[in-house]
Amino acid sequence: MTGPLDGLRVFDLTRILAGPTCTQLLADLGADVIKIERPGEGDDTRRWGPPYVERPDGTESDISAYFLSSNRNKRSLTIDIAKEEGQRLALNLIAKSDIVVENFKVGGLAKFGLDYASVVSVKPDIIYCSITGFGQTGPYAPRAGYDYLAQGMGGIMSLTGEPDGDPLKVGVGIADVVCGMYASTAILAALHYREKTGRGQYIDLALLDTQVAWLINEGCNYLVSGKVPQRLGSEHPNIVPYKVMPSSDGYFILAVGNNGQFKKFCDFAGVPELAEDPRFASNALRVANREALYEILPKITVTKSLDEWVEGLSAIGVPCGPVNTLDRVFSDPHLLGRGMRISMPEPGSAKGEVEMIGNPVKMSETPVSYRRPPPHLGAHSDEVLREVLGLSDADVAKLRDDGVV
C-alpha cells in the first residue's frame, strides 16, 4: 500500500493551480490521478516560465517550475474532448474512476457530455468536484475567475500592505491553493459518506467563497464590531507587539502573545521598566497604545543582531523568528529535516532530477509517497489506455491517427 488513498482513481480535468493543487494532494496520498490534457497543448502552466526544467541538450522542456509545483504523482493522458470519440473515451475512463475534478467555466463541460448530469449516468456513485471562480450559483457564476480577482473581491488585499500604501496581493496564488485544499477535504468527506451509503455526490467549490472563509479573525472582527479593518502592514490587529522588527543586520518577527512573554522580552532587551509602563501593562492597553510602543521598540531592537534576538528570545520562550529569503528557507536545517525540500529522478532533465517542495503531511501508518515526477505531456497515454481500458496497440494507434489522443 502506497498511501491511504491507494486503489482510488481520479479523473483530473483541471489545470492552472487550484484544481491541480487538489489533485496533487490526493495523488501524494496514494490515489491514481490521471491528468487529462489537450493534445499538443496541455495545461497552460506548462508554458508559464521561465524557469523551465532543462533537457540534457540545454533546451527548455514542457515542464515549467510553475507546472512542477502542483502536478507530482500524476499520469498525463491527452484526449481531445471536443471530438465525439474523445468524449466516449473520457466517459469510459470515468466509469472506472472514483472521483472527477474539473475547473471549467460553469456549464463548460455540458457541451462535451462530461458535466455531472451526464457523468452520473455512467457512474452513479461518482464524486464529482467542480472548482470555479464564483461557484455554480449566484449573479457572478458566469464570470471567469482568477486568484488575483478572488484576493481583491474577497477582501484579503484590503488587509495586506502598509497603512499608507496600496492594497497588495499575497506573493503567491494563495486563493487558488486554499481552494484546492478545501476541495480535497470535501472530496475526502464525500468518500467517507460513500463508504457508509454507497452514494456519490456533487461538490461545488469557488475561489471567492474559500477566500472569504480564510479571512478568519479579521472577518469576524468586522462581523462582531461593524468596523472595517484597515491595513496594518506586518502588525496584528489584536496582539501587540506582533510585528517585524529591525535588528542590527536584518529583520525578525516579534510575536508576543501574552503579558508573561512581554515581560520576558523586556527583561532580555534590557528595558524591564517597559513592562511596568501603565500604557503597556496588558495586551488591551498595548493594542490601544500600539503607536507609542512601536515608536520605542525599533530603537531597542537595532542594538542586537538578528541571531542574538532569535536565539536569545527563543531560549526563554518568546515567539520570534527571522524573515527568511527563499535561499535561507530551503537550506534551513529544520525544514530539510522535515522533508520540505525533495528531489525526484527525471531522466529527461539536464540534472537527471527535479527539485520540489515536499508535502507537509506526516502520517505514521500511511505516509505520503513521491512516486512520479510531474509528467511530460501525454507521457502516459498508451499506458493508461492499455491498463485501465484494456485497449490494444492497434486501438491506441488508431486513436492517435484520428487525433483523439
Image (tube, grey):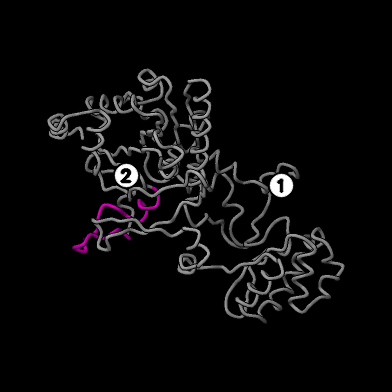
Badge 2 is on which residue? 43
* Residue 262 falls inside the magenta stretch: no
Badge 1 is on which residue? 221
**Vertical placement of residue 335 versus 105, above or below:** below
**Vertical placement of residue 272 versus 41, above or below:** below
Which residue type does callout 1 highlight? Asn
Q: CA distance from mark 2 to mark 1?
A: 40 Å
- Which comes before the other along the chain, label 2 or label 1? 2
Left or right: where 60 falls relative to 228: left
* Residue 53 falls inside the magenta stretch: yes
Relative to the observer, which residue lies in front, 280 or 90? Answer: 90
User: Quarter holding the C terminus?
Assistant: top left
Measuring from the top left, give residue 272's x and y in whole percent. 81, 75
Residue found at x 21% / y 37%:
382
**Vertical placement of residue 346 versus 111, above or below:** below
Measuring from the top left, give residue 370's x and y in whole percent. 38, 50
Which residue type does callout 2 highlight? Asp
Measuring from the top left, give residue 20's x and y in whole percent. 40, 43
Marks 2 and 1 in Cβ contact (< 8 Å): no
Judge whether residue 19 can be spotted in this image: no
| Residues shaded magenta | 51-70
